[in-house]
Image (cartoon, rainbow, N blue to C red):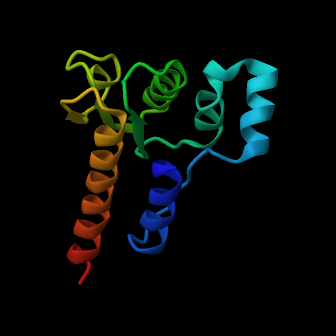
Amino acid sequence: AIASHQAVDYWKNGGMRAVAFNDPSLLTCVSNDFGYRHVFAKPIEMFADAGDALIAISSSGQSENILRGVEAARRARCRVITLSGFRPDNPLRRLGELNFWVPTDSYGHVEITHLAICHSVVDAIMAGRR
């Protein structure tokens, strides 16, 4: 939900190309044909261009589908920004060029902090364009 909402804000308010790979048909097709662990990697392999930025969001930082998506983005020479929580040594946090880590094991606190970070970024982009 965070990624979907932010993709719209980054496009509409930030004026940048942004997409969240959350279409139900895409999710079920990739999951059925390749396995759920590839649900983000496959569309990233198809649509990512060198120099794009991937914002990877996982509360625990351990979601295999997110980690594989990051690996696909890195192969495509994309910039990687991570948002995670829970353990400071979570795998996702080690994969980004810019990492936002929330030091709590509460899903709600991690998710609301991730949302605030994403809103702050788009607000900064909008302010920079004024």
Which of the 4 image quadrants contains residue 105?
top left
Q: Which residue is drawn at 55% across and 54% down?
A: 19
Taking 126 as reference, is 39 left or right?
A: right
Taking 25 as reference, is 91 left or right?
A: left
Quadrant of the rendering where the C terminus is positioned: bottom left
Residue 42 vs 8, above or below: the answer is: above
Q: Where is residue 18 in the image (x, y as percent from the top left)?
A: 50, 57
In the rendered image, is residue 18 in sight? no
Q: Which residue lies furthest to the bottom in this view?
A: 130
In the rendered image, is residue 122 in sight? yes
Residue 41 vs 80, above or below: the answer is: above
Q: Which residue is drawn at 29% across and 74% down?
A: 126
Taking 23 as reference, is 109 left or right?
A: left
Q: Where is residue 89 in the image (x, y as percent from the top left)?
A: 23, 15
Q: Position of residue 33 (x, y in %)?
A: 81, 22
Q: Which residue is drawn at 36% across and 24% down?
A: 61
Q: Residue at x 24, y 19 (%)?
A: 87
Q: Where is residue 21 in the image (x, y as percent from the top left)?
A: 61, 44
Which of the 4 image quadrants contains residue 14?
bottom left
Which of the 4 image quadrants contains residue 94?
top left
Asked whether 78 or 8 is in front, the reply is: 8
